[in-house]
Image (tube, grey):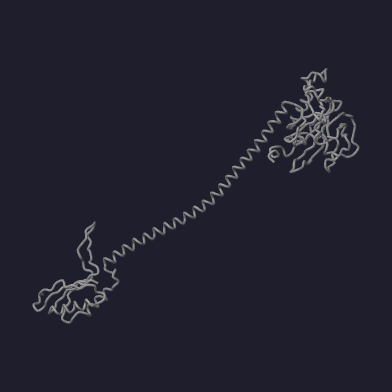
Amino acid sequence: MFTKYQWLNSCTGIEIHILPDGSLSGRYCMVTTGKDSLDIIEKGLLDENLLSVSSKLPGRRVALTLTGKGVLVKKITEDNAGGSLQLNNLFPNLKAEDFYVQHFVSGSNIFISIIRRELVDDILLKLQKHGVEILLVSVGPFSASHILRQLNFYGGEAVFDGHQISSNKEHEWEEYKYVKGAQTGFPLKIGIEVVSEQLVLAYAAAFQLALYPRLDAVSLPVDRIEEQLVDFEQKQKFNFRGAVILSAFFLLLLVNFIAFTHFNSLNESLLSQVNHSASSVESMQKTENEIKVKENLIKELGWAKGINYAWICDQLGQSVPAGLKLKQLAVNPVNGTETNRQRREVFDTGKLMISGDAGEISEVNDWILRLKSVSWIKQVNLESFSPSADDEKQSFIISIKY
């Protein structure tokens, strides 16, 4: 999967056939790679000056195959190679520096293809001027080695567009020759799609470029093309890995965002509960403080006993003997003053002070005994009993705790 997505998803194969008069005949085939298939999406011919390349193949990545005049092919065996292939030994009259050399190994046979550098460079320059990005170059029919078993050839010979290839049962090439006008005699098919003999090598070139990372491509060692191929391969890997890394970071960021949103929502919920609890505690403390203030006030006022003062006075009034005359009744009388920051009176809560006049001490004692029998009275004391301003009466002061 990683190999697939680090490479091309579509490309174009071009075969340029050099005619005997030096003119060019071009054919192209565009393919796209699917999940488990390679599909032809467009095919056709190019004009002899290759001017139609710019309109038919704008910005296309191309694999180029050169055939025809100027391409020399020679077969040798590994035994004859001796581990080192010297061009001057095979073609004594040629200058090695003037030619590109391509090797195609099939079984025990090696096919050597040569072509003039000047011719190749001129064709490459024409294509590149039209905006074509060439990534792979081969000469002869040898790029077809990857696709011959896809075509409906029968027996050990494959013939198409003048190329005659003989192979053994292991599909190893044994002989090759070019015979102008030689044809197979029946429609060629790739799968179920009929393909013209003239387009076989264009398709083969596209095939080996599309599957370059997984094939041993047959290619001509042109330095600048090989450099372009390496640069493009590294660029594709870099772009793919960059996209994977960015996608991974984006996924992590998305997961982080979702997690952050989730936990932030939980945090806000908990914070709301904490604030509500804090507010409740604060409100409760405030209420408790208010209650304490009011309790203190009630205590100071003597209301903490839960007895109505009017009722107390009424009860006392009903129990006063006829011989006693009351002058003063004080409920929770003042019991001094407190000076903190400001002067404040202190009340003696739960206490009654009664003063009055009596003719006889016995009358006061009788009343005190009567008061001690009252359920809401805790204690009764005679504070004083002394002569009054009226010579016939005595003054008394009684304190009652309730």
Q: Quadrant of residue 347?
A: bottom left
Asked whether residue 346 appears in the rendered view, the answer is yes
How many marks overall?
A: 0
Q: Quadrant of residue 136?
A: top right
Percent position of residue 9, x then y: 72, 39
Rendered view: 65 above or below 331: above
- The residue located at (83%, 42%) in the rendering is 193
Q: Residue furthest bottom?
A: 322
Asked whether residue 70 appears in the rendered view, the answer is no
Q: Nearer the viewer, residue 156 or 126?
A: 156
Q: Nearer the viewer, residue 78 or 134?
A: 78
Q: Residue furthest left?
A: 391
Rendered view: 397 above or below 100: below
- The residue located at (87%, 32%) in the rendering is 166
Rendered view: 290 above or below 384: above
Percent position of residue 213, x then y: 72, 35
Percent position of residue 61, x then y: 73, 34
Q: Quadrant of the C terminus?
A: bottom left
